[in-house]
Image: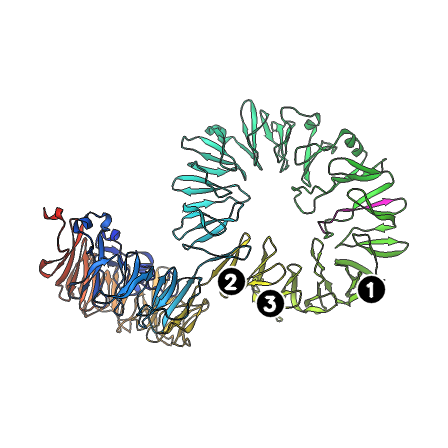
């Protein structure tokens, strides 16, 4: 286990630095006194020229102190020996002579840095000095190492903060959204801030995700979410982001569409979660969705069961029956010798239809139509609510069905000659009587399609079924209930509001009726709205129709009001009472705009193109987009003023309050990728809501709010009326259903000894710690070298660069086709050395070079290798000696590569303060430069025992009773 606020570890970023204060848990030590590093940690240690295996019974020495795990000084030795997994052990410290100078009383311990070490007791962290006395009393939930400038990062009462050596806060209080601090030594100090994920509910309330919670997707009908915790456990959270179902599952899957159950996996078991957030009691071995509400699952008895939308078992099936299930849209068919059982979404139980029935191949969703065998006659129709026509008792016309079509949520049925047999509504009722069917045969019936549903699957109950022009009974409407309304005086009827009319969907439909005396308008009930005295009436477009009478053309609105029109060559309704017009038939004639309500010209002919005024569904914004002859677009208001100047290559309406505009690129510089075009959002008042941003896109929430996102990840949230609700710097905003997720990017910068920003934080850079007055700053384009004021003093070539502490130069290793090359650069960015292989940090004119996985040597500033120095693992000299590994065992060599301390250890540390830590199996030792043991930790009777020189036991003072027998 590593302490919470350790030094920086950026996997795959600009800098990978080790947590040198890494500590092992008692459980780790129970398996041995050393552990090999793997993965990212192993690569990072190699860059720093540190051993690939780490001591853990006695940790590496720092500032004359080495942490050691021994039986607790606050527990009876027999109790400590009996505690499982060495949980009766605590951390203490040895000095450089191998003496136990701080007794083992700490649950966890960091290493010493600048005279203080972070340690924990009773679950709280504090700091001790080199004598073991409390310098800062334990009060933190986590604590990091102190730094050169006397600052450390801690967490107090759930809030990260910076403190000084007396424990007092330094710098300005951090934003409540900060989740963690990463503080790296140097002058100034590198500080990285990471932020909590914030979720904004539809009412504007902010919710902070706890336990590093990550929201995955919306779920259910009560504003819940599938979420996972920091340990990748999945559960369900409510609207307040509290766990409704604890994150105990390895995965939760919500099938696409409006499924009522979610599948939750835990080991080899499958559970179900209902849409209300409750857990189905039974678990299964496997499960797959059949429809949006029906599932197939296998239980512990190896039986396959059919489950409904709340997890109830509807039927148990053997293997052969399960494999023969028929699935048709939302219906599941289960055949046996006596009948076919039909299960459907939202319907409890099963319907029975004749044996050998199969689903019709025709697309009749949301209805199910079945026939007797593949080539047989239609024998049943099942409506979405489970009502059935046919089945065991069939009307005569059912077997005559040859083709079908769903129109406005009703099922139209015809025979092979196209004769209408009946129309079935969503409740399974046949709407047409024999008398009505007889009348329909003597005329032309035009079905009416729904406006709101392009696929005609949903029902708009107010819309008549169709319009009829009879051969001998006049014309009229086939009402929604299946009855006829005919008038012998009417000769023709047509829909006044066509699909492209941009009609207000809340307004009743109107129909144009022709009679001998003229044309007029009626509503869906046959009520006359405009008298039958017009010579001709056109369908409505954007809320207005043309009415022609006695040689005069007028505009006609839905209330039957007439408006005079100018005498021009061409007129087109664009909404809101506005008409665009051309005065002549010339090919290059320009458009003007006329307002029929105010009877005035909005703008004289001067435009090459004019958009619509309506946003859609009859909603008018009182503005329209327009293009000038130079190709530039803008927006004109009701006074004929350019509320948005005509200087854009494109203008698009977002809603009745907002426009998105695309800046015209200079001639010949149009971006090849339109996703990076400069766009802005401007309100109908002409004021800019979002400045020009590359790749700006917009998405709508169901409540009308607008989410705008730029190519660089910056996001904004606007209300439906165009007001900016949210714009947070360096924050990504993403829709989660009707919720909003705010993800602020990590910030990296540098602070001084007072905790104030010396080089301000920025999310656009990845940085390194300062080394000898210089640090690295990597962006999207290059890596820069900066000074302590943040001023660029050099630029490094392309690549991933590192400049760890105690390295004289920056370095970068690139590997292509299995061949590695390492480059070293000075503080100006100049390459001073290039060598084949993987190099380490360079210190005192020497670096470690890996030529292969098991071949390391030393090189100098000219890249020359040291003769005779080739080992499996190799470090840099420290106190005159360097660790080296051969035949998988570590020892220490001198500057000429000769072993001074024989290679007999499984793990070693570099020398520090004249001593090193070495380990072998279950033994760790502190040795001096001659190899003489100063202290040894051995495993006896289930406890760690500390011996000094001469095999004198230092700790524990007394051995367990069982060891003395």
Crowd class of label 2 (few under 14; some 14 to 19; many from 20; radius 10 Å): some
Helix, strand or loop at disc 1? loop
Crowd class of label 1 (few under 14; some 14 to 19; many from 20; radius 10 Å): few
Which tag, 1 or 2, sits closer to the chain's start?
A: 1
Q: Is residue 643 left or right of residue 744?
A: right
Residue 208's spot in the image, x, y percent?
Answer: 46, 57
- Distance CA(mark 3)–CA(mark 2): 22 Å
Which colour assignment does the render follow? rainbow
Q: Which residue is mark 1?
A: 584
Pick the front one: 612 or 42: 612
Q: Is residue 804 left or right of residue 926?
A: right
Helix, strand or loop at disc 3? loop
Magenta region: which residues? 504-515
Examine the image and state in which quarter residue 624 appears: bottom right
Q: Which residue is mark 2?
A: 713
- Distance CA(mark 3)–CA(mark 1): 35 Å
- Distance CA(mark 1)–CA(mark 2): 49 Å
Q: Which residue is mark 3?
A: 670
538 to 379, vertically: above or below: below
User: From where the camera sits, is residue 686 visible?
Assistant: yes
Which tag, 3 or 1, sits closer to the chain's start?
A: 1
Q: Is residue 772 left or right of residue 739?
A: left
Magenta stretch containing residue 510, yes or no?
yes
Crowd class of label 3 (few under 14; some 14 to 19; many from 20; radius 10 Å): few
Q: Which mark is residue 825?
A: none
Task: Name the quarter where the N terminus is drawn.
Answer: bottom left
Residue 535's spot in the image, x, y percent?
Answer: 88, 50
């Amino acid at each position: 286990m590593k302490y919470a606020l350790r030094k920086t570890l950026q996997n795959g970023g600009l800098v990978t630095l080790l947590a040198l204060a890494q500590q092992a848990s008692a459980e780790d030590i129970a398996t041995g006194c050393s552990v090999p590093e793997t993965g990212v940690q192993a690569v990072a240690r190699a860059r720093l020229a540190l051993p690939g295996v780490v001591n853990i019974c006695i940790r590496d020495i720092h500032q004359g102190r080495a942490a050691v795990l021994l039986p607790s000084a606050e527990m009876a030795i027999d109790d400590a020996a009996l505690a499982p997994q060495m949980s009766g052990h605590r951390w203490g410290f040895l000095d450089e002579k191998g003496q136990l100078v701080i007794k083992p009383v700490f649950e966890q311990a960091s290493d010493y840095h600048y005279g203080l070490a972070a340690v924990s007791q009773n679950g709280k962290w504090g700091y001790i000095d080199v004598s073991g006395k409390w310098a800062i009393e334990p009060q933190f939930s986590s604590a990091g190492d102190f730094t050169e400038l006397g600052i450390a990062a801690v967490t107090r009462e759930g809030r990260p903060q910076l403190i000084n050596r007396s424990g007092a806060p330094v710098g300005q209080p951090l934003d409540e959204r900060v989740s963690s601090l990463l503080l790296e030594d140097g002058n100034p100090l590198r500080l990285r801030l990471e932020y909590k994920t914030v979720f904004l509910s539809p009412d504007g309330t902010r919710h902070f995700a706890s336990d590093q919670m990550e929201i995955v997707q919306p779920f259910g009908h009560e504003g819940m979410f599938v979420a996972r915790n920091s340990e990748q456990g999945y559960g369900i959270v409510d609207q307040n982001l509290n766990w409704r179902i604890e994150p105990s599952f390895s995965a939760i899957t919500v099938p696409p569409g409006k499924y009522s159950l979610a599948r939750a996996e835990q080991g080899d078991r499958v559970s179900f979660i209902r849409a209300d957030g409750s857990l189905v009691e039974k678990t299964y071995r496997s499960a797959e969705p059949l429809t949006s509400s029906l599932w197939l699952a296998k239980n512990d008895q190896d039986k396959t069961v059919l489950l409904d939308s709340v997890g109830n078992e509807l039927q148990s099936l053997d293997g052969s029956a399960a494999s023969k299930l028929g699935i048709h849209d939302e219906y599941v068919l289960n055949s046996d010798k006596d009948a076919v059982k039909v299960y459907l979404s939202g319907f409890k139980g099963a319907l029975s239809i004749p044996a050998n029935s199969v689903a019709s191949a025709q697309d009749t969703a949301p209805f199910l139509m079945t026939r007797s065998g593949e080539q047989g006659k239609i024998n049943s129709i099942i409506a979405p609510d489970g009502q059935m026509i046919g089945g065991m008792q069939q009307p005569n016309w059912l077997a005559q069905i040859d083709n079908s079509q769903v129109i406005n949520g009703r099922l139209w049925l015809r025979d092979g000659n196209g004769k209408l047999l009946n129309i079935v509504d969503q409740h399974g009722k046949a709407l047409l009587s024999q008398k009505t069917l007889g009348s329909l045969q003597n005329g032309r019936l035009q079905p009416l399609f729904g406006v709101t549903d392009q696929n005609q699957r949903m029902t708009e109950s107010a819309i008549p079924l169709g319009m009829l022009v009879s051969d001998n009974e006049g014309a009229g409407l086939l009402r929604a209930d299946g009855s006829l309304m005919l008038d012998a005086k009417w000769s023709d009827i047509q829909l006044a509001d066509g699909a492209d009319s941009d009609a207000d969907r809340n307004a009743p439909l109107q129909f144009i009726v022709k009679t001998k005396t003229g044309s007029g308008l009626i509503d869906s009930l046959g009520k006359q709205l405009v008298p039958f005295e017009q010579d001709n009436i056109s369908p409505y477009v954007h809320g207005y129709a043309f009415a022609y009478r006695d040689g005069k053309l007028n505009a006609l609105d839905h209330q039957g009001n007439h408006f005079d029109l100018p005498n021009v060559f061409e007129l087109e309704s664009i909404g809101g009472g506005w008409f665009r017009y051309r005065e002549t038939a010339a090919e290059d004639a320009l458009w003007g705009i006329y307002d029929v309500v105010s009877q005035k010209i909005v703008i004289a002919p001067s435009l090459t193109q004019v958009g619509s005024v309506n946003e859609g569904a009859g909603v008018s914004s009182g503005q329209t987009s327009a293009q000038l002859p130079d190709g530039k677009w803008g927006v004109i208001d009701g006074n004929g003023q350019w509320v948005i100047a005509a200087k854009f290559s494109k203008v698009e309406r977002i809603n009745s309050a907002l426009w998105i505009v695309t800046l015209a690129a200079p001639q010949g510089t149009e971006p090849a990728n339109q996703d990076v075009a400069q766009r802005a959002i401007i309100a109908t008042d002409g004021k800019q809501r979002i400045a020009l941003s590359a790749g700006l896109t917009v998405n709508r929430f169901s409540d009308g709010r607008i989410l705008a996102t730029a190519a660089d990840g910056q996001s904004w949230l606007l209300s439906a009326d165009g007001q900016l609700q949210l714009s947070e710097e360096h924050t990504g905003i993403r829709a989660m259903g009707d919720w909003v997720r705010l993800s602020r990017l990590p910030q990296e910068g540098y602070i001084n000894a007072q905790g104030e920003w010396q080089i301000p934080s920025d999310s656009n850079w990845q940085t390194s710690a300062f080394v000898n007055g210089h640090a690295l700053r990597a962006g999207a384009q290059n890596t820069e070298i900066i000074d302590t004021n943040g001023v660029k003093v050099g630029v490094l070539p392309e690549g991933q660069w590192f400049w760890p502490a105690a390295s004289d130069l920056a370095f970068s290793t690139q590997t292509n086709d299995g061949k590695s090359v390492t480059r070293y650069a000075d503080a100006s960015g100049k390459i001073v050395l290039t060598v084949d292989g993987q190099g380490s940090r360079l210190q005192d004119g020497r670096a470690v070079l890996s030529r292969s996985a098991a071949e390391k040597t030393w090189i100098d500033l000219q890249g020359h290798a040291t003769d005779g120095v080739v080992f499996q693992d190799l470090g840099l000299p420290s106190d005159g000696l360097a660790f080296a590994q051969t035949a998988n065992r570590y020892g220490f060599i001198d500057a000429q590569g000769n072993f001074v301390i024989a290679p007999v250890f499984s793990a070693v540390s570099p020398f520090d303060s004249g001593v090193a830590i070495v380990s072998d199996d279950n033994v760790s030792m502190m040795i001096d430069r001659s190899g003489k043991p100063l202290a040894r930790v051995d495993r006896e009777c289930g406890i760690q025992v500390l011996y000094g020189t001469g095999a004198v036991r230092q700790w524990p003072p007394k051995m367990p009773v069982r060891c003395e027998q």
